[in-house]
């Protein structure tokens, strides 16, 4: 299957958007965590129990919620450096103006929170696979088998992606 230049440019823009979105999300979450005091053991146990009741796909342990005071800030700095590198890569591909426009739309998209669940549950993964297929890194069969599904946060089961969500999100992102 041949992909036209116009469609390839759309795929690339979606890929860059998702990559920048993920870096921005990870930095924002790490920054928010760094602003809070570390949890004590009892708080960590309660949070772990709560997470295990809600999300059955991954079991948590209290140790995962306990950190040293500097560990959270170091993590936020690491995430910032990843974001900074991502922004530089986007700038080298789209130029300064294109980078500014794309990052502005990513921040706006993230603030609205309208599609964040879909972005985190399947869309970024799907677009990454589609980008690899468009660059002939994987076959179409590998793309279908390994990237065209959604994993339920609550049950852990795979289900086919609803094409209308993908189209709706893609249009929304490209119009940002």
Image (spheres, grey):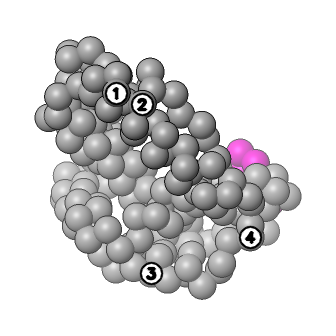
- Residue 97 appears in which quarter of the rendering? bottom left
In this view, the residue in front, 65 or 19, is 65
Residue furthest left in the image:
35
Labels 1 and 2 touching (C-beta < 8 A):
yes
Kind of element beneath mark 3: helix
Instruction: Residue at 71% x, 63% y: name it.
Output: 149
Counting the numbered discs, the total is 4
Labels 4 and 2 touching (C-beta < 8 A):
no
Q: Vertically, is 45 above or below 173? A: above
Which circle marks residue 160 in the picture? 4
Quadrant into which the N terminus falls: bottom right
In this view, the residue in front, 110 or 83, is 110
Compare marks 4 and 2 and give the one earlier in the sequence: 2
Q: Is residue 135 visible?
A: no
113 inside magenta stretch: no
Q: CA distance from mark 2 to mark 3?
A: 42 Å
Image coordinates for residue 122, horizontal then vertical, percent: 58, 60
Q: CA distance from mark 1 to mark 2?
A: 5 Å
Residue holding disc 2? 45
User: Quick check: 138 left or right of 25?
Assistant: right
Image coordinates for residue 18, horizontal then vertical, percent: 43, 56
User: Quick check: 63 left or right of 98?
Assistant: right
Residue holding disc 3? 171
Q: Which residues are magenta?
A: 136-140
Which circle marks residue 42 in the picture? 1
């Amino acid at each position: 299957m041949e992909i036209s230049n116009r469609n390839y440019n759309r795929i690339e823009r979606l890929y860059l958007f998702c990559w920048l979105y993920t870096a921005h999300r990870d930095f924002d979450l790490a920054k928010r965590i760094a602003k809070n005091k570390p949890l004590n053991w009892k708080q960590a146990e309660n949070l772990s129990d709560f997470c295990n009741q809600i999300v059955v796909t991954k079991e948590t342990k209290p140790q995962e919620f306990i950190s040293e005071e500097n560990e959270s800030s170091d993590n936020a700095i690491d995430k910032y450096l990843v974001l900074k590198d991502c922004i530089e890569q986007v700038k080298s591909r789209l130029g300064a103006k294109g980078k500014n426009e794309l990052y502005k739309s990513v921040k706006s998209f993230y603030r609205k929170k309208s599609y964040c669940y879909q972005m985190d549950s399947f869309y970024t993964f799907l677009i990454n696979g589609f980008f690899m297929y468009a660059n002939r890194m994987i076959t179409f069969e590998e793309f279908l088998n390994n990237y065209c599904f959604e994993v339920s946060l609550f049950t852990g089961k795979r289900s086919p992606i609803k094409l209308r969500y993908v189209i709706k999100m893609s249009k929304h992102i490209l119009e940002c």
